[in-house]
Image: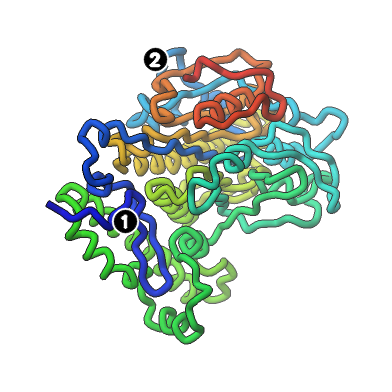
Amino acid sequence: MPKRENLSRRRLLRGLGTCLALPGLESLRPAGASAASAAATKAPVRMAFIYSPNGKNMGKWRPDGLGAGYKLSQTLQPLAGNKGEIQVLSGLDHRNATAGRDGGGDHARANATFLTGLRAKKTSGADIRIGVSVDQVAAEQLGSLTRLPSLELSCDAARNSGGCDSGYACAYQFNLSWKNERVPMSPEANPRQVFERLFGGDQSGISKEERERRTAQQKSILDFVLEDARRLHRQVGRNDQQKLDEFLTAVRDTERRIENAEKFAAKLPDMKKPEGIPDSYRDHIRLLYDLTALAFQTDTTRISTFMMAHDGSNRSFPEIGVREGHHSLSHHGNNEDKLEKIAKIDRFYIEQYAYFLDKLKAMKDVDGRSVLDNSMVLYGCGIADGNRHAHHDLPIVLAGRGGGTLKPGRHLDFDGEVPLSNLYLTLLDKVGVKAERHGDSTGKLPLVG
């Protein structure tokens, strides 16, 4: 029988200033705990908010039918393996992203409003003002329960100064997450930096020589915790030994992919991309998804935002045969060729989302469910049809069961004039965060649960 006197449920592997949080292991429950109490162990519920830019080809986005009998659209077809794990939500709006008296700047407003539900003050100076985003409302009440209160990611380099869109500050367009009305939570794009933040531990007590030795030898973070890992491996049961092996393998694989991306970038002449960012956009997205999944599995954080690209991005997609810029295509003027290319881009982003859901579904949580079962993963955009800069009937998908509080496997249509903020208020309630309102909310959306 494995010894448990020195074990705790959230054991940290340590070595030479590095610490690595483990996923929940059955063998680490307190000595004497009954099987019934172990089965009743409550896993944390995670929240992820994912943003894709420039609206959608809504004709190929919207599913056919309502309720559980709906049929996935062409764009959403990559989610077929997770059809029972998602809710497609139609008819939700963001009025505060519309022009109103502010005129142009819909892309900046789309990003700024998406998680806040509020109207950004039109300024390109330092006097920005928007409001707290839903992820930071949750982080304020739940962040102390984890090593990191929240995690902010993007495939775009951060920009928090200067003007970007029709008189709006770049801070609006390059940030989804807002700590308060004036302070954005700048996202990280470099997977190496994300990995170090999540798993690198406190380096303050390590000498300069020691840090240089690590770099010179190009050793994995895991190399410094293997001795502790082997000791723990002998103390846990067979099922947890397998889980521990799989977890360590996943972390090492992620780190190796980061290192390979760095080596590849170093060999390219005139390569200006930040160190550690893959040359492939698809690989960059998936690597950041992998890191988010590991952060959720280890309970390093329970709250994440990921802006795959800022709204207004004119990135091209040669890997799927689209060489024109995304933003330029979004002003399609009902041109069928442009609409087909937009649909290709939309599907590309959904394929990456499906990859993330598959990743979470394959991870077993401490309560025996999957990490996806215990998550709420929202995917969407602050613009529907990019040609009209429409901010109503937004393209929204909500995945996961929220620890048993959500009922996926259906398409719901709220038929317009319903703030997207109502959904956020509902999700906050599902994770036990008390909030009377959020943004322009008018109430909760009870049907999603």
Is any atom of residue 285 visible in this view? no
**Residue 250: numbered disc:** 1
Label 1 sits on what residue type? Ala
The image position of residue 233, as x and y in percent, is 20, 59
Amino acid type for the residue under numbered disc 2: Ala
At 48% from the left and 49% from the top, the residue drawn is: 146
**Residue 344: mark in rendering:** none
Residue 221's spot in the image, x, y percent?
38, 69
For the point 68% across and 23% down, the residue is: 441
Q: How many marks?
A: 2
Residue at 55 percent across and 45 percent down: it is: 143
Instruction: Classify residue 186 by image quadrant.
Output: bottom right
Residue in front for this viewpoint, 414 or 242: 242
Extreme residue in the right direction? 101
Q: Is residue 25 in view from this perspective?
A: yes
Above or below for 139 versus 75: below
Residue 352 percent location from the top left of the image: 44, 43
Nearer-the-camera pick, 202 or 378: 202
Q: In this rendering, is residue 287 above or below 387?
A: below
Determine the secondary structure under disc 1.
helix
Position of residue 254 in the picture relative to residue 34 (left or right): right
Q: Which residue is mark 2?
A: 68
